[in-house]
Every structure is written in C-alpha cells, then in structure tokens.
Image: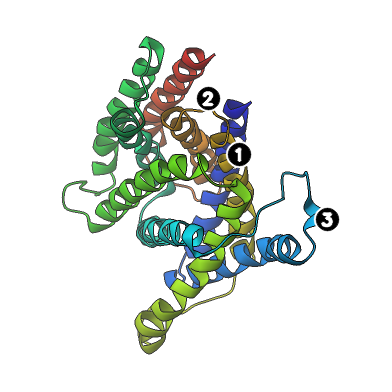
Amino acid sequence: MWLLLAFLSAALLGFYDVCKKRSLKDNAVLPVLFLNTIFSSIIFLPFIFLASFAPKVLGNTIFDMPVVGWEVHKFILVKSFIVLSSWIFGYFGMKHLPLTIVGPINATRPVMVLVGAMLIFGERLNLYQWIGVMLAIISFFMLSRSGKKEGIDFAHNKWIVFIILAAITGAISGLYDKYLMKELNPMLVQSWYNVYQVFIMCPIILLLWWPKRKTTTPFRWDWTIILISIFLSAADFAYFYALSYEDSMISIVSMVRRSSVIVSFICGAIFFREKNLKSKAVDLVLVLIGMVFLYIGTR
C-alpha cells in the first residue's frame, strides 16, 4: 500500500511542478512562495481547529491528529525551516531553467536519500533496487550533456547550483521525515509545518522582497498559484502516510516520488515548448526504467 501511495504522490508532484513553472514565469519568486505557504495553511487550518476544539469530529479518521506541546512542535518547526530552504532554492532555479532540465535533476535526489537511509536507518537494497539507483545516476550525467546544447553549463550556472542545493536540502528533509513518521502523526506534521512556514516567510518577504519590489521582477497574480498549494498538499498527504507504514523504505519512496518527472517533462514539451527533447527523452527513459526496477525489487 505504501508503494501505491508513493506513486500517487509522484503524479500529484508532477502537476505541482507544472503549476509552479507557470506561476513563476515572468513573476516575482518570493511572493509566489509566500502565497503558496498561506494557501497550504488555509487547507489545513480547519483540521487543526477541529482537532483542538472538536476532536470527536475527526476521531478514527485519517485526518485526526493529537494536540501536542512544544516538545513535539519544535521538531516540526525544524522540518519547516528545512523544507522552506529547499523551496527557496527550487523556486529560483525553476524560474530560470527549463522544466525538462529541472525535472530530471530532481529525479536524482533519491540517490542522496539512499546514502542517508543506508547510513542512518540501516536500509539495504537488493540487486533490482541497486540497478534502479545506478540508472538514475547515469541519467544525471547524460542530462548535463543535454543542458550544454541549450547553453546551460552545469559547472558554472548558478541556477543549476540552486536546483542542486534544493535537491540536497530536499533529501535531508526526506530523511528527517522518515524519523518523524516513526514517532509522530502524519497529519500533525503536515498541518503544522505549513503553518510555521507562513510565519518564517513573513520576515523574508518584508526584508528581502518588499524594499526592492519596484526595482525587481514585479509580482502578478496567477490562478495556478492556488493550484500549487492544492497539488502539493495532496502529494504530501499521500507521501506522509506512505512513510507511516512500518515496512516503508524512505529510499524507495523518495525514488518513486521522483517519477513525477514524467508529468513535468510531458507538460514542459507541450505547454512550454522546450528544446532538445529527444536527448532529454533518453534521460527520462533511464529514469523510468529505474522506477521499474525499483518496483520489481520492492514487490
């Protein structure tokens, strides 16, 4: 069941990336991210309210969550800082790079999670799973060659560095999620980390964007900003519940979630008219074959 939830999360993440790319086109990054945190919080605030003041309404449902103190909330607050760091890097990188480049780079994130899962949680992969991981690594190096055809030098492009930093902090977040899901309620973590992100973003907006808003890229409203929050919240909901299963493996869940690149790649080709699709498609096929081996190895 946890593997099916991981695949569901992957599909939703693909649409999340597409909406994010659309929202960031010729738009100010930080306000889009700020609104994303606000709308995501609005989705979960009713559940927080009911859990606090009418717990019987959500009792014995997947939306139920306990009321906890600071000794638990401090761990969720750490999660918020980690995720927001990844998002800031990822949003800036997404704005300045083709979606067909960003997607496959993000697809290599689980390799970092794999190393961490083996060192921290003692997870071990079988032959099929190792084949899937190696194919993902190979696809990254092939992607760097595809990027050069568009004038994107992986070694000297700061937006590539931003996407890589987003992948690293995202991998740290994934490992931390596995730790949290061993102890905490999934709905509790997802609800409160979204709320905390709003408060963290407030000084960032006031200090970094507001004073320079007239001299940088102006903010414009786009309805896909709301869709970002909806698809992300649904994707994370499936993801957290996948990790809540005792036999779930964060190395596999993280890898499967990166198959979201299928959706983002197709939409990048159709809606954003991106270039060099044939060479990038080879990279994508390697990722897909890797997903197949991971699925076979997990059954």
The residue lying toward the viewer, choosing from 143 and 287, is: 287
Residue type, label 3: Val
**Please, what secondary structure does the residue beneath circle 2 have?**
loop
Say whether disc 3 or disc 2 marks the residue closer to the N-terminus.
3
Quadrant of the image containing the C terminus: top right
244 is higher (above) or lower (below) than 46: above
Look at the image and tell me whether residue 294 can be seen. Answer: yes
* Residue 28 visible within the image: no
Where residue 86 sits: x, y (%)?
38, 56
On residue 241, the disc is 1
- Amino acid beneath label 1: Tyr
Residue 75 vs residue 114: left or right? right
Q: Name the kind of residue labelled 2 in the image.
A: Asp
According to the picture, the residue beneath numbered tag 3 turns out to be: 57
Quadrant position of residue 276? top left
> Counting other residues with Cα less than 10 Å from the Cα at mark 1, is it few (<14), some (14-19), or many (20 or more)?
some
- Residue 199 locus on image (x, y percent): 49, 74
Q: Residue at x 52, y 60 (%)?
A: 193
Which residue is more in the foreground, 252 or 49? 49
Residue under label 2, please give it.
247
Q: Residues within 10 Å of mark 3 (few under 14, many from 20)?
A: few
Outermost residue on the left side: it is 156
Residue depth check, mark 2 versus mark 1: number of the one nearer the observer: 2
The 10 Å Cα crowd at callout 2, few under 14, some 14 to 19, many 20 or more, is few
Residue 251 at x, y percent in the picture: 41, 30
